[in-house]
Amino acid sequence: MAKLLGTPPLINITPLTEILEVPIHINNPIHPNSANKHKRLGFKILNELSRVEMFVTRIETVGKQEEILAELGKTVSHLEQTLYTFELENGKADRLENTTGRILLQRYMNRTGLAEMFPKASEYLGVDPVMTSGSFMEAHLRQMSSINQLVSIAIQLQNDLRLTNHKFIAHQIALLYQCINQAGTKYTGFKSRVEEHFGTVKDLCNASDEPVLTPELQTWLNELTVDIVAEALFSGRPMAQQTPSAGPLSDYINRVSNNDGSEDQQQQ
């Protein structure tokens, strides 16, 4: 220790003579370059129109309830104000003369294809009807909901395999099979894999009050559910191929993502 105290330091630390100002970025976006202003506007309108479509659908189902009408009016008002402010902030005040936020919204929906994706919202907002065969978004979201339910049940089965009682595994596999039927053609190959051992699992579960799957059946079910989750979440398919109705949504996202404002200039 004495030798250590008698040797010179490896480096000399310079005393601090001043405290530098620390820059504050609390009001700056986390990813300032992740999207241009047109992309941010596009995603904001997509989100708000999804809400409008949902509110109009609920009104058709349960009637005109005060709470739903209030939320619908608030969402539409925010949509119109968002577009109006966007035009104003981007030096297009000359386009706003004798123009309302509703008209700007109608034009935007027609120009970008959102009118086709949200037919109920379009009708409510006074956009000329462009299709009568149903909503692309509604069909897409319905199938994505089925896929989400399929993944949830598959993950639940993986967790339940760790239990010491597999009494209800057969019922869960039956529900898994039903979800496979609803998830789309890309999942039909899993039906035969379920059918291969479902009868054996059912008989085993009905044989006692506290049944436990054999190691072979546990391995089969674990591999089946892992493959289902991988197909749903990690297949690497582009959005346009996720469901048969995903094309318009994918086209819209690509359009607003690649829009640098030149498209708007052509519309003037």
Image (spheres, rainbow, N blue to C red):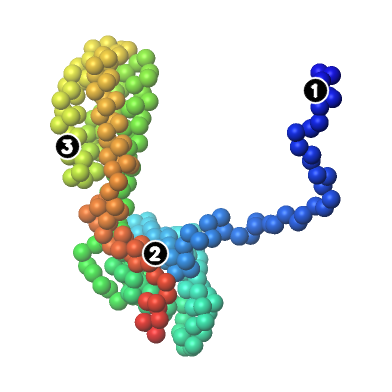
Q: Looking at the image, which residue is at 34% across and 56% down?
A: 61
Residue 113 in percent (x, y) is at 31, 69
Quarter of the image where the C terminus is located: bottom left
Q: Would you name the residue on which mark 3 appears?
A: 189
Q: How crowded is mark 3: few (under 14 residues within 10 Å), some or many (20 or more)?
A: few
Looking at the picture, tell me which residue is in the foreground, 84 or 227: 227
Residue positioned 24% across, 23% down in the render:
220
Closer to the camera: disc 3 or disc 2?
A: 2
Which disc is residue 4 wearing?
Answer: 1
SS of the residue at dot 1?
Answer: helix
In the image: residue 257, left or right of residue 190: right
Query: What amino acid type should be assigned to the residue bearing mark 3?
Result: Gly
Residue 57: % across, % down: 35, 59
Comes first in the chain, label 3 or label 2: 3
Question: Label 2: few (<14), some or many (≥20) within 10 Å?
Answer: some
Where, by quadrant of the figure, is residue 102 drawn? bottom left
Label 2 residue SS:
helix
The N terminus sits in image quarter: top right
Residue at 29% over, 52% down: 238
Q: From this view, report whether residue 75 is shown above or below residue 4.
A: below
Apparent side of residue 68 relative to residue 225 in the rendered image (left or right):
right
Question: 10 Å neighbourhood of mark 1: few (<14), some, or many (≥20)?
Answer: few
For residue 124, what is the image quadrant? bottom left
